[in-house]
Image (cartoon, helix red, strand yellow):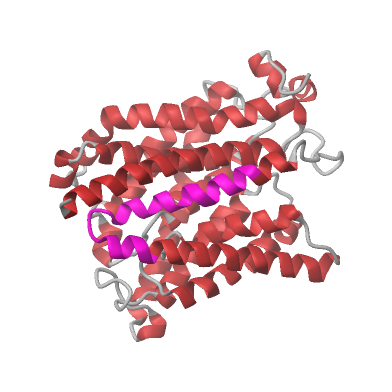
C-alpha cells in the first residue's frame, strides 16, 4: 500500500471511531438523567450526529471555499468532509448535556445548526483552516478549543440564559442507570482515538504518538479523580472514575500529537483534579444548572489542555508543532493562552446572541408541567421504561 492509501485507510477507521464516540456520549448522558427524560437525552446527540453530518456533507466544502481554506486534500479525498462533519457533530452532541431535562427538541435542532455555522465553523477555520490563530502559531491537535472549549462555554451560556430545571437544588435528581453511563464512557474512550485522524494526512508516526498520549492522559485523570474523591469522601465511586477518564480525554485533545507520554500523564492528573474541583465545588458556589457538567468537564478541561500544550509541546515529538514554555519557547505558551481566550470570547458572545435571537421566535424550554411529566412523553410520546 502507498502512504496515501495508508492515510485514507486510517481516515476511514477514524471516522468510524468518531461515530462510536457520539454513541458513547448519548449513552453516557442517557444514564445520568432521570428516567422520565432518558429517551430525549439519548436522542439529542444522535440528532446532532445526523443533522450536522448531513448539512456538513452538503455545504462543508462550500464553507471552506468561502473562507479561502479549501485544500487540494479536500478535493482529492471526499472522506474528509465526512470526517470533519463527524467532529462538528461531536461538539454539538456535547453541548446537549448542559441543557437536558428542560430544552425543547425543536429549539435544540434549530439552535444546533445555527451554532455550527456561526460558532464552530469560524472557530475551526481560525485554527485548523489557516486563519488568524493558525497564523499566530496556535496548536490544537484534536479540538481542545474548537470542540471542547466551544461546547463547554456554549453549554454554560445556554444553561444560564435558559435557566435551571424546576426544582434544581431543592429536589433530588438522581441518575437513572449508571451502568449505561459506564458503557457510554467506555465507548467514548475507544471512540476518542478517532480524533487521531486529523494527523493522517501528515504522518502515521504522529498518529501512533497521539494514541499513546490519549491513553496515558485518560488513565492518569481517572486515577487522579478517584484519589481526590477517595480522600475527600472516604469512598471512591465508579461514577468518579469514569468522569475522570472523560476529563483526561478532553484535556489531552489539543496536545495529543505534540506532547510526550510523560507530559500526557501530567496533563491527565491536572485534568482529573481540576475538573473534580469545578464540578463538585465551583458549580455549587456559582449556582448555575449545567445539567451534566459539560462546562466543568469540557470547558475547563479543554482550557487546561490548551494551556498545557503551551507548556509541554516539543518538536522532538512532532516536528510540525512547536516547543512550549518548558522547552525554551515562551511565545507558544502565550499563543495557547490567546487561542483559549479567543475561543471563550467568540463562543460566549455568539452563543448568547444566537440564543437571544432564537428566543424571539421560538420557546427554548418546556413548561413546568412538561418537566414534571418528563421530556420523553412531552416531546416524543414515548417512555424509556415501562
Question: Farthest residue in the front direction?
Answer: 1
Residue in view at x 41 percent, y 58 percent: 342
Residue in view at x 72 percent, y 57 percent: 240
Q: Nearer the viewer, residue 2 or 108?
A: 2
The number of callouts visible is 0
Left or right: where 242 falls relative to 328: right
Quadrant where the C terminus sits is top right
Q: Is residue 137 above or below residue 243?
A: below
Q: Nearer the viewer, residue 212 or 351?
A: 212
Left or right: where 256 falls relative to 129: right
Name which quarter of the figure residue 290 lies in: top right
Q: Position of residue 122 (x, y in %)?
A: 33, 45
- The secondary structure that most of the magenta stretch takes on is helix
Left or right: where 360 falls relative to 119: right
Question: Farthest residue in the top direction?
Answer: 381
Q: Is residue 286 magenta?
A: no
Question: Farthest residue in the bottom direction?
Answer: 328
Please say whether residue 127 is visible from this viewpoint.
no
Residue in view at x 41 percent, y 75 percent: 260
Q: Nearer the viewer, residue 65 or 357?
A: 65
Please say whether residue 364 is visible from this viewpoint.
yes
Q: Position of residue 345 (x, y in %)?
A: 45, 54
Name which quarter of the figure residue 81 lies in: top left
Q: Position of residue 184 (x, y in %)?
A: 61, 42
Residue in view at x 42 percent, y 76 percent: 312
Q: Nearer the viewer, residue 49 or 200?
A: 200
Left or right: where 344 falls relative to 36: left
Q: Position of residue 112 (x, y in %)?
A: 47, 32
- Per the rendered image, the range of residues in magenta is 183-209
Amino acid at each position: 500500500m502507498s502512504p496515501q492509501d495508508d492515510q485514507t485507510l486510517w481516515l476511514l477507521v477514524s471516522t468510524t471511531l468518531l461515530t462510536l464516540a457520539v454513541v458513547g456520549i448519548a449513552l453516557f448522558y442517557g444514564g445520568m438523567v432521570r428516567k422520565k427524560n432518558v429517551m430525549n437525552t439519548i436522542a439529542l446527540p444522535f440528532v446532532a450526529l445526523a443533522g450536522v453530518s448531513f448539512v456538513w456533507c452538503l455545504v462543508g466544502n462550500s464553507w471552506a471555499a468561502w473562507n479561502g481554506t479549501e485544500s487540494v486534500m479536500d478535493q482529492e479525498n471526499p472522506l474528509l468532509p465526512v470526517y470533519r462533519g463527524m467532529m462538528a457533530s461531536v461538539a454539538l452532541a456535547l453541548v446537549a448535556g448542559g441543557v437536558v431535562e428542560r430544552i425543547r427538541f425543536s429549539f435544540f435542532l434549530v439552535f444546533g445548526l445555527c451554532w455550527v455555522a456561526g460558532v464552530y465553523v469560524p472557530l475551526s477555520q481560525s485554527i485548523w483552516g489557516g486563519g488568524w490563530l493558525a497564523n499566530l502559531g496556535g496548536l490544537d491537535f484534536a479540538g481542545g478549543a474548537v470542540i471542547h472549549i466551544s461546547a463547554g462555554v456554549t453549554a454554560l451560556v445556554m444553561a444560564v440564559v435558559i435557566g435551571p430545571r424546576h426544582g434544581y437544588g431543592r429536589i433530588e435528581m438522581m441518575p437513572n442507570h449508571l451502568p449505561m453511563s459506564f458503557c457510554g464512557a467506555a465507548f467514548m474512550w475507544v471512540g476518542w482515538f478517532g480524533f487521531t485522524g486529523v494527523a493522517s494526512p501528515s504522518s502515521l508516526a504522529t498518529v501512533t504518538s497521539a494514541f499513546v498520549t490519549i491513553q496515558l492522559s485518560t488513565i492518569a485523570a481517572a486515577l487522579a479523580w478517584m484519589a481526590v474523591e477517595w480522600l475527600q469522601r472516604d469512598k471512591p465511586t465508579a461514577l468518579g472514575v469514569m468522569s475522570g477518564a472523560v476529563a483526561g480525554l478532553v484535556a489531552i485533545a489539543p496536545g495529543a500529537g505534540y506532547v510526550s507520554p510523560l507530559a500526557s500523564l501530567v496533563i491527565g492528573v491536572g485534568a482529573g483534579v481540576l475538573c473534580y474541583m469545578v464540578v463538585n465545588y465551583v458549580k455549587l458556589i456559582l449556582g448555575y444548572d449545567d445539567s451534566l457538567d459539560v462546562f466543568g468537564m469540557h470547558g475547563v478541561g479543554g482550557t487546561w489542555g490548551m494551556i498545557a500544550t503551551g507548556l509541554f509541546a516539543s518538536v522532538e515529538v512532532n516536528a510540525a508543532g512547536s516547543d512550549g514554555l518548558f522547552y525554551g519557547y515562551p511565545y507558544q505558551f502565550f499563543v495557547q493562552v490567546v487561542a483559549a481566550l479567543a475561543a471563550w470570547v467568540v463562543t460566549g458572545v455568539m452563543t448568547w446572541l444566537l440564543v437571544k435571537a432564537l428566543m424571539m421566535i421560538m420557546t427554548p424550554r418546556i413548561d413546568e408541567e412538561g418537566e414534571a411529566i418528563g421530556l420523553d412523553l412531552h416531546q416524543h410520546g414515548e417512555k424509556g421504561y415501562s
